[in-house]
Amino acid sequence: RRHSFSNCKVPRGNQFDCAQVRIMSIEMTEKGGGKLSTDHPWHCKEKDECLRLMELDANVKSQGLSEAQALERKNIYGENKMTEEKKKTIWQRIWDQVANVLVFILFVVAAVSAIQGIISIVSNDSESIITNWIQVGLIVLVVSVNTAIGIYQEGSAEAAAEALKNMLSADARVIRGGVEKMIPANEVVPGDLVVLSTGDSIPADMRMMETINLANLEAALTGEAVPIDKITTPIAMPASGEPKDVPLGDRKNMCYSATLVASGSGKGLVIATGDYTQIGLINNMVQQTESRKTDVLEQIDQVSKYLAYFILAVGITTFFVAWLHAGQKPLDALSTALTCAVAMIPEGLEAIVTMVYGWAVTNMAKQNAIIRALPAVETLGSVTVICSDKTGTLTKNEMSVVAFVTSKARFKVDTNASSRVSTNFVRDDSYLTKRADHHEKDNADDIVKDGPNSNVGRRNRKSDDYEFTVDKLEDANPEETGPSTNEVGVAGDGTSPDSAYVKGALACGVLCSKCVLGENGTRKNEIGNPTELSILRAAYFADVDVEGIKKECPVVAEVPFSSEYKFMATIHDPLPEIDGEGHDDDYVVYVKGAPDRMVKFCANQCSNGSTTGVVESIKEDYWLEQIAVLSSHGLRVLAMCRAFVPKSDIEAGAQLGQEFVNGRSERWLTLVGLCAIMDPPRPECVQAIKEAHGAGVRVAMITGDHKDTATAIGHMLGIVDETYSEAVTGLELDNMTDDQLKESVMTHNVFARASPENKIMIVKALQAVGQVCSMTGDGVNDAPALKAANMGVAMGIEGTDVAREAAEMILADDNFATIVTAVREGRVVWDNLRKVLLINTPVNNAQGLSVLFGMVCGLPYSPLTPIQVLYSNLICAVTLGFVCAVEPAEDGIMDAPPRRVGKRLIGRYLFLRIALGTILLTGFVVGSVFWAQSLGKTDSQCRAQALSVLNLGACAVTVSARFTYNSSFHPRIFRDNKYCWYSILIVIVLQVAIIYIPGLNYYVFKMRAMDADQWGITALFMFFQFVGMEAEKAFRRYLKSKGADTDDRELTVIDRILADADKQGQTGSFRAESKHDIASFRSVELHR
């Protein structure tokens, strides 16, 4: 059914409901025999037409459905709930963990040991009975523990869907048979008339029939941060002629399931329930998005497969050597071969890999990066592109005044100030004096249209919280754009004015506002518009008593703000320190508003912004050019004006009309200055991006904001430079071919006016050109993009539950710098996993090969028993493996480029190191047994000798493996990782214990106490093992100094063969054409 729509060609950039019609019709026909009437563009239809299409009478608007009608529709369409994903049973989960060759070999060993145990019972061999059944118990214990760990680790793929269900309303108020009643939300059916009021959660998708000041908060679904006013009239058909091209945020006559009523009341006709709501479509995508294994887990699976073949070959060889060469009985030979197999199986590898991940997760959690799926940690180390939201992640999510422009002086405001001093307000006459380079030759109106002062809302969104937009900006006369020449006594360039000047200059923004500043100037408990609050914050940190001024100068009368005329005005008693002397019979009027309109109302200007100084005739062209200059740098611009009026003209407490300001026959206001406002970058992000660039990681910014704002922030952050000099918009991406899109994502770092759909396009295009990308998101509509990315990152503070559950990592502080910290930790994980393999693999190999080569060299018995090798396997993995699992980052880890895509965990040089460690350790174990025999030691003492050389040789490998290139013949081995020496001490203490504790040594481990000379042999071979590993490291340092690729960064012939094999069978474009086929982002083609 889905395949038939996979090639449906529709315009890109639409909402999730494309192709919804046919799929719903077919699915619902199959479910209940009825056709769900969702194939109509409800938002473009009249109310009565909607009722007709729902096969309802007009009286439904007052009477609602009858109970009989509701029951009939419920039988047709089902309950108003989303389909739950089929969950695995506990037995399926267990099978997933044990269904592999290595576990099968362990079970065979356990079965053979059990058979030998039974034979021992029959023959009354008490020693063999104990040994064999202990062996069975240990194997069952090992498999059980590893299985339990695996089940515990399994990602909760259904958690995102659960979060979506939790967002749905529990109850709904409907009209049934003319009676208003509360019913469970899952009883709502298409055609129901739902009554809404403030605070209600919307139970289903509905077309509004009545609204009374109704506004809906749809941020979780559409990304729009402010409530959307609802209407009942049809939405105009878009230019494309396709109703589906109207963005969700602009369908103002619709309310959607799981969103909230912010204010007002209304009634709505339900048109979709359950899986067929917009939130249901997203749930369907999240459920069917296939969770893919990370690169490391796939490689470990591959290593396990190759290891299984190797173990099988060695086991068979050992069997024939033991039977034919050593003269053992067939069953004993089989037991020896299985001992060899058990020895080489890395039973503890899964546990230690989990430990590596767990340690990294703990470290990242301390630094505000919360990892939801342990294996996702290593993905961070290979990330080549970090795609980040702008607001709140790269920026402070705190609108701030960055500049104040007067008739001559320009002031720069410290947006990172934490103390209240006037030096936060510094005169800098070279600051923002020219248009941004990319707007140098544009006309003023075009500059405004591209910037944050445009009256065109963001892509796919209603206009945001900035209401003081510019309608049209005229080009200034170039000869008249210079600043005023009149000099007034304010601070000189590079110095700060006193707080009295700042108090007067920003008085308009402080007094002409109903906003309440947050605690200590922060956002905590603040009330009001973010843009207006920015002026209060600037004054506060310039040591102005904001609340004191408001109390001294209460509002006498006001002109309330309206988006129709784009200004507001308040009237106050004048203060001499702000307004000068001689105004006892006047009120002072403060007006702030859209700058293009305010300039037209002004006759004068305050020289240098001094409200107590000289007033001169306005230079209109100068101000128009300043508006254009500031807009070109992506800044919001707000004009601050004032005037005096006789007290006799104003009635206290009056609500004045707009004509008080704009209804006069002559210009009458005095322009004080322009406030330039933006959401500034987080200071720590600038440094974090530098670190990312140093590590070879690109940083891309994806925002719904305007192109100029995005470009300006990009410049400040350092992601816009000569190489990536421009921003590209979501609309431009929509109109590109696949090849153009792939090129665009590699040549641009800033994507402006982007929709959630654009995020997915960007992710897939990056993946199509071989990039490993991380993507941030916070809304419900970001969930598919987070799933599609190699590393989905959700916001912990501003993010929705759905986004958090769809992501692999959550930022507890919503801070981009935390991502870079996590990338660093991800690289540490990769390094440490390789170090763990360097420790575990030689030890495992040496255990098995010692059995084989011991008998090849003439030993009549295995130098190691099954229990000995199981013990060595586990103790070395858990203790010595833990050493490298928690090894801190080596110096320069963020100076290297990202790990090459497809790089093998065990590359050429690591393979050679493992081979060297295996050969040395195997040779020393077998050699020590023959040495002990030559000294007249018993077979039990020789086994003790073999196990001691093996385990203490593993300690030597561990100390060397801690550093990839640096020598371990250095005091650094005693620093930074105390667990190294704790682990070695544990291994030595336990080794002594199992050798000398009576009963334990012989009945369990088949050993006897070692003599002093045997410890000398052990120490000698331990030293030789260490020297051998360090000699290889020194040779590798030499090769690297000569330019050899000792880090395996380049593709080898084997890598290319494997890569070609992986590509076989992969089909499909990296971008789905059909909008409902956004679900194909969960397809196998995408995830490959």
Image (tube, rainbow, N blue to C red):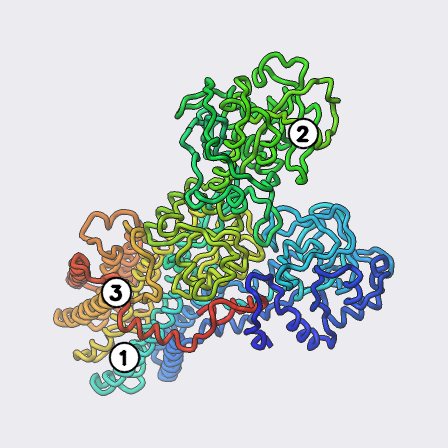
Instruction: Give the quadrant of the N terminus.
Output: bottom right
Q: Report crowding for label 2: few under 14, some 14 to 19, many 20 or more residues within 10 A (C-alpha).
A: many
Residue mark closest to the camera, 3 vs 2: 2
Identify the residue at horizontal 64%, vertical 37% (top origin): 566
Q: Position of residue 649 (x, y in %)?
A: 73, 20
Mark 1: amino acid: Val
Closer-to-camera residue (162/640)? 640
| Quadrant position of the C terminus in the picture | bottom left
Give the camera-side residue of 443 and 1052.
443
Residue occupied by mark 1: 314
Precedes in sequence: disc 3 or disc 2: 2
Percent from the top left, x then y, of residue 110?
Answer: 39, 77
Q: Are marks 3 and 2 in contact (CB under 8 Å)?
A: no
Residue 37 sits in quarter: bottom right
Is residue 927 shown to the viewer in this render? Answer: yes
Q: Residue at x 26, y 64 (%)?
A: 1048
As drawn, the label of residue 661 is 2
Q: CA distance from mark 1 to mark 2?
A: 94 Å
Q: Secondary structure at mark 1?
A: helix
Residue drawn 47% across and 65% down? 737
Mark linked to residue 910 = 3
